[in-house]
Image: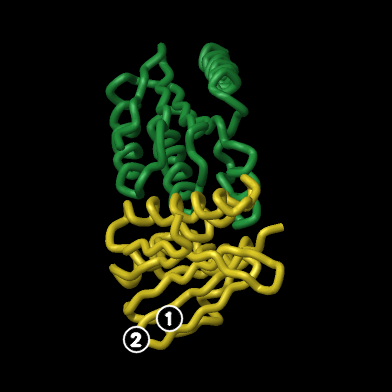
Chain colours: A yellow, B green
Amino acid sequence: MSDEVHVPIEHEMDVVTARQKGRELAAANGFTGTDQTLLALAISEIARNIVSYAERGEVVLSVVRDGVRRGIMVVARDEGPGIADIELAMRDGYSTARSLGVGLPGAKRVMDDFQVDTSPGKGTTVTMRKWLR
Amino acid sequence: MAVPILKQGNVLIASIQAALSDRDLMKLRDELTDSVGRFRSRGVVIDVTALDVLDSFATRTIRGIAYTAKLRGATTVVVGIQPDVAFGMVQLGLALEDVPTALDLEEGLTHLQKKMSKKARYRVG
C-alpha cells in the first residue's frame, strides 16, 4: 500500500470514500479500532465541509513519522470561499450550513494535532494528525 | 445504496446494510415518513449495527427521522450503535437527545411493544 492516498472530494459519496480510506490506512498501520473510528469521524466532518462550502477539493492521507512516533496525517484542501471568522467557526454549535456545528471543533477534539489555514476567497486547508498509541 | 424497510405487524424496521451517503440517508427519511402513513405503523426501528461511523450529518438525519415519525404518530427506536461508534459520538459531542435507543433489534422491538401497549391502555382508560 502506498503511503499517500489522494481522495478527490466532489460529491457527497466521496465523503464516505475518504473516511473509508482513512480507516484502511489507520488499520494497516496498527491503530486500534477506536482510533480508526475517531479518525474516520474527523475525516467525515472535514470532508463534508468541503462538499457543503467549497463544492470541491481533496483529502490527502499519509503516514508521518516524528522520531519514533508514527501517525496518520490528513490534509483537506479546497479553493472555496474560506472561513471569514475562524474563531467563531471553531466554537461548538456554530454553523452557517445544514449541520450541528460540531464539524471543526469536533474534529479537533478527536485528533491529536489540528490546524486550519484559511483566507477569505482563497480557500481552506485543514491539517490534522493522529498518533499511534 | 437503498435501505430495505421491512414491515412487521405495526412496526417498520429499517436495516442499514452498508455505509450511507447523505443522499441515501435523506431518501431513507422520506421513505420511512411515507411508509408510516401507508402502513399505519406505530413504531419504527432504525438498525445501525452495520455502520462503522455516525457523524454529525447522520446523527442529525436520524434525529430528524425520529421527530418526523413522532409527528406522524409513530415511535422510533435506534438500535445497534457499536461501542466505537458510541465512543466517537461522545467525543464529537453528538447526541440523539430524546430519541430512544436499544442494544439490538430484539431489545428495540421489546421497547416499542411496551410503549405501544402503554399507549393503548391510555386510550381505553
Q: Residue at x 55, y 81 (%)?
A: A87
Tag of residue A122: 2
Image quadrant for the N terminus of chain A? Answer: bottom left
Q: Secondary structure at mark 2?
A: loop
Q: Position of residue B67 (x, y in %)?
A: 45, 40
Q: Chain of mark 2?
A: A
Residue B91 or residue A127, whichever sits in front:
A127
A31 lies left or right of A101: right
The image shows residue B42, relative to residue B28, as above or below, that is above
In the rendered image, which residue does mark 1 sit on? A83
Q: Position of residue B62 (x, y in %)?
A: 45, 42
Classify 10 Å Cα crowding around label 2: few (below 14), some (14-19), many (20 and above). few
Sequence order check: which comes first, mark 1 or mark 2?
A: 1
Classify 10 Å Cα crowding around label 1: few (below 14), some (14-19), many (20 and above). some
- The three-letter code of the residue at mark 1 reads Ile
Q: Position of residue A14 (x, y in %)?
A: 34, 56
Tag of residue B73: none
B116 lies left or right of B11: right
Q: Residue at x 33, y 63 (%)?
A: A9
The image quadrant of residue A105 is bottom right
